[in-house]
Image (spheres, rainbow, N blue to C red):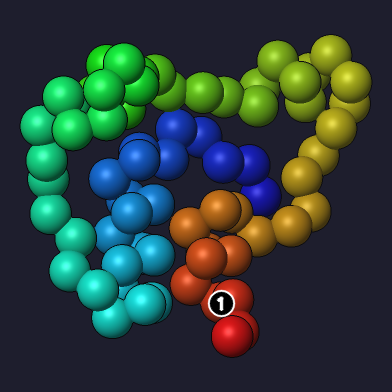
Amino acid sequence: MADEGDRVRDIAAVIGRRLGLPVESVPPETYGPLGPIFAADQPSSSTRTRRTLGWEPKHPRLLEDLENIQP
């Protein structure tokens, strides 16, 4: 399956839930110079890679994979 724009917030939510830890929003300044990167909307797509290289993903999406990781 192809990942198409998983948000950092969604990734953090899955990791927090799986670890039994609370997840909350914090100001971008918390991360110093990296803060704007986390705060920006930077969707990504595998469309060009699939089209150019003929690649078709066969593994689970990131969020699904994070849900299924066994300790």
> Is residue 37 visible from the viewing direction of this image?
yes
Judging by the rendered image, the residue that carries numbered circle 1 is 68
Instruction: Name the foreground residue: 33 vs 49.
Output: 33
Q: Residue reaching furthest right?
A: 53
Vertical side of 49 occupied by 60: above or below: below
Instruction: Name the foreground residue: 4 vs 28.
Output: 28
In which quadrant is the C terminus drawn?
bottom right
Residue at coordinates 56% horizontally, 41% vertically from top-left?
A: 3
Vertical side of 70 occupied by 66: above or below: above
Label count reads 1
24 vs 5, left or right, is left
Residue at coordinates 35% horizontally, 39% vertically from top-left?
A: 7
Classify mark 1: helix, strand or loop.
helix
At label 1, the amino acid type is Asn
Residue 44 picture location, percent across and down:
51, 23
62 vs 6, left or right, is right
> Is residue 41 visible from the viewing direction of this image?
no
Vertical side of 62 occupied by 4: above or below: above
Q: Quadrant of residue 39?
A: top left
Instruction: Name the foreground residue: 44 vs 33.
Output: 33
Residue at coordinates 76% horizontally, 20% vertically from top-left?
A: 49
Residue 2 picture location, percent across and down:
63, 42
Vertical side of 2 occupied by 19: above or below: below
Residue at coordinates 48% horizontally, 72% vertically from top-left?
A: 67
27 vs 37, left or right, is left
Q: Residue reaching furthest bottom?
A: 71
54 vs 61, left or right, is right
Q: Residues within 10 Å of mark 1 (few under 14, many from 20)?
A: few
Residue 57 picture location, percent across and down:
77, 45
